[in-house]
Amino acid sequence: MKLCKQLLAVAVAGAFSTHALAGTVTTDGADIVLKTKGGLELATTDKAFSFKLGGRVQADYGRFDGVFTRNGDTADAAYFRRAYIEFGGTLYRDWKYQVNYDLSRNTGNDSTGYFDEASLTYTGFDPLQLKFGRFYTDFGLEKATSSKWITGLERNLSYDLAEWVNDNAGMGVQAGARVAEMAWLSASLFSENNGDTDGDSVKRYNLRGVFAPLHSDGNVLHLGAQYAYRDLKDSAVDTRIRSRLGVRGVDTNGGSDAGDNGNRLLFGGAAAQDGLWGDDAVWGVEGAWANGPVSLQGEYLRRTLEADRALNDVKASGYYAQLAWTLTGEPRIYKLDGAKFDSIKPKDKALGAWEVFYRFDSIKVQDDNLVTALNPDNERKAKSHTIGVNWYLNEALKVSADYIATSTDNTGNAVGDDSGKAIVSRVQYVF
């Protein structure tokens, strides 16, 4: 109660102060520091309690044609990719909390809420961290990296092959730890909203291990592997493998999209039906190297969805390779906690930091349950080339643009197009 009164007093004082950017308020307990750079943050000087209010807004616009639309003609889309209100902090020194809510409604749904994250993490066993609640389970380098600081506007296509490994629809627990200051290990158990005929939820198990003997900014060597598994026996789970091929505007909830003309391709799997499938397993490897302003990274993923009442198994694989270069010389920040890349911080506040990149994606799905006369082996493929530029004006503002050229095999749109081009742009504000 005493802490609540202290925080309330500071909030009221801050509301009536028009010129103080930061300061210390003395109380009958620990002093409280108010910071307003990059959001609003309150913290006790003994670091036992803190609260930070922030968020991110990503406003996108894109134009696309060919396989991205059903009739092949050019369409466009303007939408909020993400619009998060975020608050988090520390409780009793050893507990961290984080709640992110998506006002754009691209994350979550009506029944479970539009939460990106709602978690509580215990850090008292340092370096071991125990996370509880609703969050994205650990799988892959690009997913570990925040959407604020990924290089491309959308993550690589191989993640579309098994979206469930990174889903947050449910509740779970995850243990993660740094090992000998050169490795990251994590393991999680997640209870999905999906359930079997008895009402028993589908359980998801994730493992990830990364060896990073070099992990300072601009000097990174990162090698990792991951595995995820769930048992779908007697469950009705939507297993469709669908992809927007890196262009969210074909189908989005955050604003106007291409409507009925948007073409989100089906590569395999089936809509939810009881008992179609048994085991569902995914494994992958990841790697990254950075030297000053230059970085290389890539991931490979392979999924096997075993049939139960379905006639045949579904097999999928995909990979990407990416080269990025910060023209103004700044390195990408790297964090061993979570084994991930973070932001680029501009040295020149007037010029900002300029980054260019190229990424190649390839995915393949074999689903003999979808055999057709025109596609007797039913191996559906897609390849994508992405060239992009990111301008970090400062630590809060980022402007991005990507050019995407995609081609597909044994799948396309309603008029037979099997390739398409897109230009997508974004203005991002982080506070």
Image: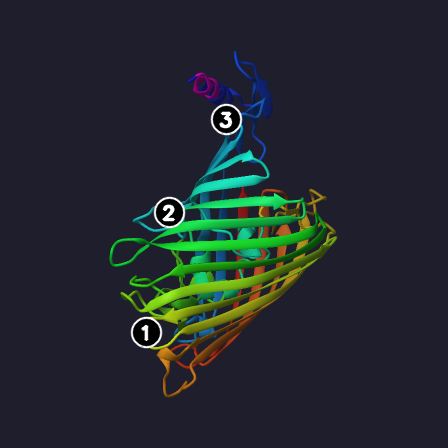
**Which of marks 3 and 1 precedes in the sequence?**
3
The residue lying at 25 percent from left, 59 percent from top is: 197
Q: Which residue is mark 2?
A: 114
Residue 242 at what x, y percent from top left?
41, 67
Snapshot quadrant of residue 360: bottom right
Any part of residue 354 in sight: yes
**Which of marks 2 and 3 precedes in the sequence?**
3
Any part of residue 77 in sight: no
Residue 6 lies in the magenta-colored region: yes
Q: Type of residue at label 1? A: Ala
Task: Name the mark on residue 310.
Answer: 1
Q: Type of residue at label 2? A: Tyr
- Side of 343 where 312 appears, left or right: left
In front of the other: label 3 or label 2? 3
Snapshot quadrant of residue 279: bottom left
Q: Which residue is mark 3?
A: 92
